[in-house]
Amino acid sequence: MHDLILRGGTLLDPGQGINHRADVAFSAGRVSGMGEQVVGAEAGVEHHVDGSFVVPGLIDLHTHVYWGGTALGVDAGSVARASGTTTFVDAGSAGPGNYAGFLRHVIEPSGPRILAFLNISFAGIFGFWRSLMVGECADLRLLDVGEALRVAGENLATIVGIKVRVGRIAGGSSGMAPLEMAIEVAEELNLPVMAHIDLPPPNLRQILERLRPGDILTHCFRPFPNAPLVGGRIRESAVLARENGVIFDVGHGMGSLCFDTARRMMEQGFLPDVISSDVHALCIDGPAYDLLVTLSKFLALGMPLGDLVERATLRPARAVRRPELGCLRTGGLGDATVLAIEEGAYTYLDCTGEKMTSNRRLICKGCVVAGAFLPVEPREI
């Protein structure tokens, strides 16, 4: 007897090379059976998902879900019900000075799982809003590597790396110093750094040359300036960084996914390693919306479904070094997302205002978080 069975769907788990029809069962918060293991079994709750894909629980590598603690935070539970995201990785909303509140009031009571990159700035992202924009790395007095090391070291159950926002908007005239400080903390704890990039200085080459294997460049398909293209061709520094193990993450957000950049990069064989939404209060109503809409944009750009699922499950799990996530296996964590491809007429917008039309989109039919089925609450875009 299982707690829950999803029946009739196509199990799609690129990390394990699985793409076939199979029932999936859950009990006590974990996967309790798959395929033949579930034939003839009964469950307290059954959902028939014929015509849909059952995939590992979607992981959004770049989000801002410190709701109520920062102006840009959104409610992870609401976003999960709209997008099927089961794990949210917060990208530096909180710093050493306010991580305790984030943990106590948001992460611990959350339904969907929340992990976090700790901001190298003591105050986290504190001045990000429509009417003002104060970069948390613009004043180096706000950066204390000792406090970042202490807080991250005390919270390794939920902190998966160090976040730093680099560029003229986030860092003012601080240049590369915030990145160097973030790397210093990350090296001490053997954690990855996630580096945001906005307007120069510094330039993209400087940042890519400093990032280490396993570090993450987010906003990797941004428009000019600091785009990964020069004269329409991929920058040599981007190619070398990928060869060196740097992870390229989309991080859509308010200003960081450009369709033209994405097309040109993909035409030259440079696909993103991870697809994430960078969902926050200023882009949740467009252009990013959530992870599912961001994935639908890459479906419209020509990426196959299996590649999309891999970049929103297995690869982000590897990026945060949590191998228990991003896969479906008997005895494993009981997170899954039910997806379908819907035909119609859809219009998508990027951060530059360019529109792209498509006759397909991904829709969520529900998700399973820790073995419990969470009904979808779709919204129009």
Image (tube, rainbow, N blue to C red):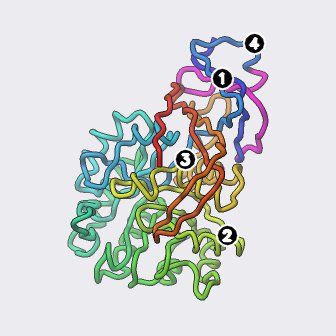
- Give the answer, above or below, for where 31 lies relative to 287: above
Q: Toward the viewer: 174 or 45?
A: 45
Q: Toward the viewer: 213 or 87?
A: 87
Q: Which residue is mark 3?
A: 322
**Identity of the residue drawn at 55% across and 57% down:** 347
**Identity of the residue drawn at 25% across and 62% down:** 122
Residues at marks 4 and 1, CA–CA distance in whole angstroms: 15 Å
Q: Callout 2 environment at 10 Å: few (<14), some (14 to 19), or many (20+)?
A: some
Q: Which residue is mark 2?
A: 266
Q: Which is more N-terminal, label 1 or label 4?
A: 4
**Number of numbered labels in the structure image:** 4
Q: Quadrant of the N terminus?
A: top right
Magenta segment range?
15-37
Residues at marks 3 and 2, CA–CA distance in whole angstroms: 28 Å
Name the amino acid type tagged 4: Gly
Badge 2 element: helix
Which of the 4 image quadrants contains residue 147?
Answer: bottom left
Q: Callout 4 environment at 10 Å: few (<14), some (14 to 19), or many (20+)?
A: few
Label pair 3/1, CB-CB below 8 angstroms: no
Q: Which is more N-terminal, label 2 or label 3?
A: 2
Q: Which residue is mark 4?
A: 40
Q: Which residue is mark 1?
A: 48
- Give the answer, above or below, for where 176 lies relative to 160: below
